[in-house]
């Protein structure tokens, strides 16, 4: 079996200057993008987060309406049998939502391929950046904002993938949840990546992601190596 090709990508310092280059595994960051699979997996991830507690009352459940509003004939008005009819104000709801379970169990292979497609899509769109070091001297939001500005990510919703969460970084990002979110490399999935425009990966987290994907492919056997276009 041939070794997968690698492509170098620039690694930036926290001040926005170039720190060096790192090789990106082609099997993880330049794989064919399966848009249909990505859409199915993202829909499943989103559905799994829904509580499904929505509920409405039908005509048999709403209060009142036991008596016929007026007699059947002789009034000149349309006939009605109950005030609980859906066409009446305060009546029941026709085909309204009821509590249900939105959970979808996804095969590991689908989740893995969706992750690879999401990573490859970010690389293709030039929305992937590498950061040398994620440590902050102080747990200050101001310091983190300066890093974000230096990297040119001020106006972009960004996902930062790290190998381990630094306490200072965690505390500094609390006020930036809408703009800047943090995930561990061992836990990140396609949904996390696609929710944000930019993907920022710590240099120490890069081998964790690549090893995670390649180890899963190896464990799944020959069939997992086939990429559906």
Image (cartoon, rainbow, N blue to C red):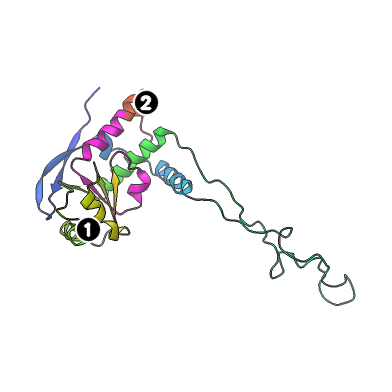
Specify whether residue 30 is in view: no
Residue farthest along the bottom direction in this orientation: 76
Boundaries of the magenta span:
186-215
Left or right position of 202 against 57:
left
Label 2: how many Cα within 10 Å (few below 14, some 14–19, many 20+): few
Identify the residue at horizontal 11%, vertical 55% (top origin): 15
Magenta region includes residue 94: no
Question: In the rendering, at what x and y percent does residue 150 appear?
Answer: 15, 58
Q: Exactly how many numbered labels are in the figure?
A: 2
Identify the residue at horizontal 74%, vertical 58% (top origin): 60
Q: CA distance from mark 2 to mark 1?
A: 37 Å
Q: Decide: is 102 above or below 209.
A: below
Q: Which residue is mark 1?
A: 153
Tell which circle, 2 or 1, labels the residue nearer the N-terminal end. 1
Give the SS element for disc 1. loop
Q: Which residue is mark 2?
A: 220
Specify whether residue 190 is in view: yes
Question: In the rendering, at what x and y percent does residue 24 appear?
Answer: 20, 38
Magenta region includes residue 198: yes
């Amino acid at each position: 079996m041939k070794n997968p090709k690698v492509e170098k990508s620039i690694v930036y310092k926290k001040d926005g200057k170039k720190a060096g280059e790192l090789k990106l595994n082609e099997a993880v960051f330049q794989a064919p993008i399966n848009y249909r699979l990505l859409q199915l997996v993202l829909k499943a991830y989103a559905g799994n987060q829904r509580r499904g507690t929505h509920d409405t009352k039908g005509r048999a459940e709403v209060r009142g309406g036991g008596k016929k509003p007026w007699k059947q004939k002789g009034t000149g008005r349309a006939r009605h049998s109950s005030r609980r009819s859906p066409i009446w104000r305060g009546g029941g709801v026709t085909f309204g939502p009821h509590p249900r379970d939105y959970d979808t169990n996804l095969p590991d292979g689908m989740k893995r391929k969706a992750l690879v497609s999401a990573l490859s899509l970010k690389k293709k769109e030039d929305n992937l950046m590498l950061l040398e070091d994620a440590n902050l001297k102080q747990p200050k939001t101001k310091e983190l904002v300066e890093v974000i500005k230096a990297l040119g990510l001020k106006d972009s919703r960004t996902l930062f993938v790290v190998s381990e969460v630094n306490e200072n970084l965690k505390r500094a990002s609390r006020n930036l949840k809408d703009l800047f979110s943090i995930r561990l490399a061992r836990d990140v999935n396609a949904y996390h990546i696609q929710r944000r425009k930019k993907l920022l990966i710590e240099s120490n987290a890069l081998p964790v992601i690549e090893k995670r994907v390649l180890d899963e492919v190896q464990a799944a056997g020959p069939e997992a190596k086939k990429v559906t276009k």
